[in-house]
Amino acid sequence: MKFNAMTAVAAVMLAVPGVASAGPDDDKLIINGETEIVTKAPLPAHMEDLNMDMIMSGWHFRSDETQVLEMDDFDNPGMVFVEIAQEQWDTVEGSEGKSCASCHEGPESMTGVRAVYPKWNEDAGEVRTLAMQINACREENMGAEPYEYTGGQMANMEALIALQSRGMPVNVAIDGPAKETWEKGKEIYYTRYGQLELSCANCHEDNYGNMIRADHLSQGQVNGFPTYRLKNTKLNTVHGRFKGCVRDTRAETFTPGGEEFVALELYVASRGNGLSVEGPSVRN
Amino acid sequence: MKLSTTLLAATVLAASSAMAEPVAPADVQFDEYGAVAESLTGQPGDPENGAMVMKTKSIGNCISCHEITALNDAPFHGEIGPTLDGVADRWSEAEIRGIVSNAKNTYPGTMMPAYYKVDGFVRPGNAYTGKAPEGPLDPLLSAQQIEDVVAFLVTLKEQ
């Protein structure tokens, strides 16, 4: 397969001048010249028997032109949404007359939060994604309407919160009470859905680094979310992306925020344990 | 009523002797290695249409996974599966028909989708809408499209 892959890479490079390299590259991601992002890390213990060398951020699979947009916040189109989220943070909404700031002061109080979500919530007796926690605060503490799960306001708020942990290692817990949900997510990851009978693993474990038509397959990591995509010029949420990938197998998708995608998010996040929180990232 | 039923039966008979119904997905006869000896339609395939099916994203989309020099006029060939250059030196027509109809019989567990299969899927959807299907699924390619693709692939010889 090596030879075939090489010729295909060469063909692609000839066809698209300006695509510097198709394989995951060795570039280093340092944001604003100061925040060093760990984009390659050893396999987490639960992945050690897989046929993979290391875990890698999706940033390595993008073209130089796309990569550079994430290296400076002035160039990162996702940062506009962080500014909007700062306003959302301070806006009083709902029956209790509160904003996020009423309980949490500034967004810097969220440092470290993104890195450990999805996370078991003892009181609720469930694994909660960051989006679920944001909506729980809105409904229970503010008496406000929940954000649409994959909507713009949710993506903005996730970007603001992710930014507070930028550069910190993803470290979601998969044992204890989270284990059952994690196992369920793992099963979904390896199930071949839809009329094309493709699993997440078919594309993102067995074929990362390979081209599928014009797309360069990454490991499908979620450490960079929310992600600004040049393709749809907006911030994209994790469950929005999962939905697109499942749809592309000609399958009936699961519901964003539903238990299957929550479990899948915990499992996929755990495959990135050790990479840095990178959001809001830039992809194509 | 009697007369019209007999008439109908006669018409169907006449039609089927002129052009046989394609073999239904469930009735395709795979041998133990996954090959399919009989044409799915009894009609010769059209290699030109087969090439079109293979490179069109909304139809076969084969080049999303395979590199094929003969289809280089279409951009972006993937590298998930092997190059199909010279495929007819490696496989017979029956074997190629089997691989295109349902590659899982030739290569257990392969990532290549089954193009002539309509059931046994986990959460199949209504094409690429992400929604549940509205009725029985159509195979990814019709019997004649499969024959067209086979007719094209048997021309890919290097020796």
Image (cartoon, coloured by chain):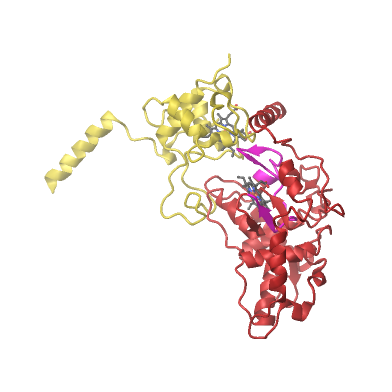
Chain colours: A red, B yellow
Left/right placement of residue A280 relative to residue A256 reads right
Q: Is residue A4 left or right of residue B71?
A: right
Q: Which residue is drawn at 77% across and 54% down?
A: A272
Q: Image quarter for residue A276?
A: bottom right
* Residue in the image at 62% along x and 33% along y: B81
- For residue A128, say whether it is visible: no
* Residue segment shown in magenta: A203-230
Judging depth in this view, the residue of A205 and A12 nearest the camera is A12
Whole-percent x and y of residue B39? 41, 28
Residue A49 drawn in magenta: no
Quadrant of the snapshot with the C terminus of chain B: top right
Q: Is residue A122 visible?
A: yes
Residue name at image x 87 percent, y 54 percent: A34
Q: Position of residue A31 (x, y in %)?
A: 82, 53
Q: Where residue A182 appears, x then y in whole percent?
A: 72, 60
Magenta stretch mostly in which secondary structure? loop
**Residue A155 lies in what quarter of the image?**
bottom right
Q: Nearer the viewer, residue A209 or A76?
A: A76
Label tally: 0
In the image, taking residue A101 as reference, residue B1 lies left or right, namely left
Q: Nearer the viewer, residue B17 or A149?
A: A149
Would you say residue A224 sits in the magenta stretch?
Answer: yes
As drawn, which residue projects farthest toward the bottom? A96
